Amino acid sequence: MPLDLFTVGDPIADTKAPMDVPIGERWSTRRFRARLVNPANRRKLTVIVVGTGLAGGSAAATLGEAGYRVKSFWYQDSPRRAHSVAAQGGINAAKNYRNDGDSVHRLFYDTVKGGDFRSRENNVHRLAEVSNSIIDQCAAQGVPFAREYGGLLDNRSFGGAQVSRTFYARGQTGQQLLYGAYQALERQMAAGNVEQYARTEMLDLIIVDGRARGIVARDLVTGEVSTHFADAVVLATGGYGNVFYLSTNAKGSNATAIWRAHKRGAYMANPCYTQIHPTCIPVKGDYQSKLTLMSESLRNDGRVWVPKERGDARDPREIPEGDRDYYLERIYPAFGNLVPRDIASRQAKNVCDEGRGVGPNGLGVYLDFSDAMERLGRPAIEAKYGNLFDMYAQITGEDPYETPMRIYPAVHYTMGGLWVDYDLQSTIPGMFVIGEANFSDHGANRLGASALMQGLADGYFVLPNTINDYLADGPFEKVDDSHPAAAEALAGVQDQVQRLLNINGTRTPASFHRELGRLMWDLCGMERSEESLRKALDRIPEIRQEFWTNLKVSGDWTSINPTLEHAGRVADFIELAELMCVDALHRNESCGGHFRAESQTPEGEALRDDENYAYVAAWEWTPEGAPPVLHREALEYEYVHLAQRSYK
Amino acid sequence: MRSSVGNPADEKRGMNLTLRIWRQKGPSVKGRMVTYEVTDISPDMSFLEMLDVLNEQLILSGDEPVVFDHDCREGICGSCGLMINGTAHGAGVAAPGRTTTCQLHMRKFKDGDTIDVEPWRASAFPVIKDLAVNRGALDRIIQAGGYVSVPTGTAPDAHAVPVPKKDADAAFDAATCIGCGACVAACPNASSMLFTAAKVSHLGLLPQGQPERNDRVVNMVAQQDREGFGGCTNIGECSAACPKGISMENISRLNHDLLGALRAGARPKS
């Protein structure tokens, strides 16, 4: 690799997981060795939690219950709006209620394999260990999981697994789990343990004497920018999929909190690992503002196919069996329609590239329920997927009970994120990162129903146990606005807000965002090559240059101004996009969702290069002009053997 | 690589619409309806995408865009909520009549239509700016008792407490409420009864919700009164406007629970 794109710094390693005991004992050992904080002293310690999704909501509630003073921040009007609410399919746990051979070890194994051997074994094992407690906790909160007639919990299957370990609440599992956490959080607010900052966006991190001690945030209603201090800061701000403009994320989902923390010294790990979800409603037109997922659970009963012949424009119902190519079942007989997401997406792209795609622009494949309707009857399909079918009909104007759905891959989740150790602490002491915002558990590809598991694992069970070890050194010296570090951060944010308003050019933030997203989808999307990435890296600085000279934001900063909010987020997306491309270019192998055209097996599957790339790429920000610094964390596999993934 | 963006030639473009939109600079400033024209609106656009088109025009001409709450744009977060031609979320415009604003699509309108767009109107939901209102009152109703007190780590095995499927399904139906506030906006009394009843039902139908059942209902009802929501007179506009189809049965259940709780001596915390 040419040296102008990045430089290589010292390796980095997790030092918190107790490696002197077997993997099954590491979490309990860590909990034992982590120092505790006496309940009476917890009242003297303040923790800022940014974000109220599954990770942030559950963490803030749990820390409040423990007796810490919590300040909770979110940009929406209510904590219940966080985008975890939109997760549809389910949540994994190793309960083995089906008696189908599941176990903690199998969930651990499936997750490491599903992540294409690019995740940290210790973290994944812990995730599998705590998965069962999550289901217990949520059931006790009154989360209305799907149940059998005997009153026990129902399960279904998800991609990348041959057991049924996914718990669900119709197609609204994320909503119901989030409301469980939200209600627990509201209870702590009522009890006075959690202070609430609604419609407030974090815009910088305050570091004092090397420790994260607070944030700069903007009240989105009054426009006021102010500082907030604490003994520790927890970021639970979700993923950065909106770099691509079109994604299944919410419109407001953004990378600003993690990116500004990165610019303050937190390493960003594996930013090129993005998940393109195979089953989304295809793009309609250039006005499109977001994409809508159709849950992976649909692949339990839906069969994916395209016509065998290119350009077969017949109504799908008229195409006889013999003229259909159920390509996932053909290529992967063992897993069929339930192969992991990265594989299903790439194969959809392949058949469309061959010209066999369906729909108005040839960018779609069929997801067909006619066999399942015949086998189970329409009422059974309605009970399982009713809300998804309704949503599809509302968006497309087509009835999926009558005609097959058309689906196409779309950006859905980002496995990359801020680097954290086993304690979920970033490279900045006192700043913890949980949920999708960190990088730790999913490697290069996340399995379905594992995001909800990770968010709640981090928030309910991991962070509340590990953060004590850090807080045991507190309370730290009191800081306020008069501290130079706080004043500098505050002034920096105020300057940027003013700068965005002053450019007064001719293009809106949305227009830059669309251009960036299109570029990233085309050049750093489902398939990347050295050529495409170099092209992106040539173009992104030009977009950034134009953004800062030709942006138009109307209105002012003294009241709600969504254009101003969007502008700040797009500025950060542009910088992050560049790092994503550098990361994708430097990783000259394919793994999981990162598919480099140059690195594939003869059958066209992702070809890893374990000898050279079995590491986490943790990037350090350097001030403008200087290339980022790469710190490698070697990935050692003690319990899972590195192998070419096979789902055939 | 092929791009995912559709070919504009495939689209049936062309609707021209007149929008009359409520503009209000702030909570204490008087608002008014302002007329705008949008052209070339695709029937496949969502209602909010149509407003995006308007806002892009406004920004470029140096005007302030219309502020409205929205986030997931897939009908689940509950952020969006507009009175469209006098109905919450445009209910009645959409067939079968159940939708969030973000899931209302322009194919439900005709070329040349005039569309009135207003915020939720209720004294418990003060306008923040334009079409955005403050719905914090709904969160405070939840704070008053809309939870099961089960601190993290204290739960028994999930199978320790079986729940009859019938109860679990009914609880789920109530639990789908997204807290958008359409029920309040649609109610002639601006009552939040359907919202409160949905949570009382959801938790009251489950064994896990029993220990706090009486206190929950009296405290949540007391809180909605304190917030300034109107009384429920069983008109049913709430349920008709609800994007999730929360039924009036939940209100009956709340009233039943409330009566039982009061009879058993439960009284709201002051």
Image: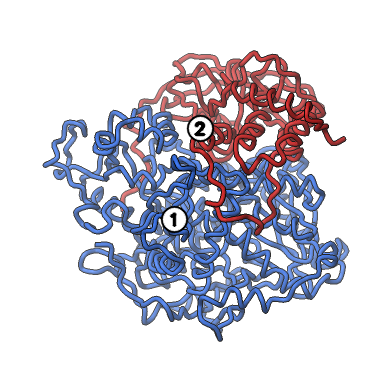
Chain colours: A blue, B red
Q: Nearer the viewer, residue B98 or A501?
A: B98
Q: Pointer 1: residues within 10 angstroms few (<14), some, or many (20+)?
A: some
Q: Are marks 1 and 2 on the same chain?
A: no
Q: Residue at x 82, y 49 (%)?
A: A192
Residue B256 position within the rendered picture, expressed as x and y whole percent measured from the top left: 68, 24
Calculate the distance from the C-alpha at mark 1 to the C-alpha at mark 2. 45 Å
Q: Position of residue A301 (x, y in %)?
A: 31, 43
Note whether A116 is above or below A447 in the view shown: below
Res A394 → quadrant: top left
The residue tagged 1 is: A97
Residue A316, placed above or below residue A516: above
Which residue is painted at 54% across and 29% down in the image? B244
Q: Mark 1 is on which residue type?
A: Tyr
Left or right: A311 in relation to A472 = left
Tag shown at residue A240: none
- Category of crowding for the residue at label 2, using alpha-carbon neighbours closer than 10 angstroms: few (below 14), some (14–19), many (at least 20): many
In terms of image quadrants, where is residue A294? top left
Dots 1, 2 in contact, CB < 8 A: no
In the displayed structure image, the side of residue B189 where residue A350 appears, left or right? left
Seen at 45% across and 16% down, the residue is B111
Q: At 45% from the left edge and 81% from the top edge, which residue is drawn?
A: A636
B129 with respect to A283 (left or right): right
Q: Chain of mark 1?
A: A
Q: Which disc is residue B49 wearing?
A: 2
Mark 1 vs mark 2, foreground winner is 1
Out of A558 and B136, give the one closest to the viewer: B136
Q: Position of residue B50 (x, y in %)?
A: 51, 29
Which of B226 and A284 lies nearest the eye of the viewer? B226
User: Residue flagged by tag 2: what amino acid is it?
Assistant: Glu
> In the rendered image, which quarter contains the C terminus of chain B?
top right
Q: Position of residue A323 (x, y in %)?
A: 13, 41
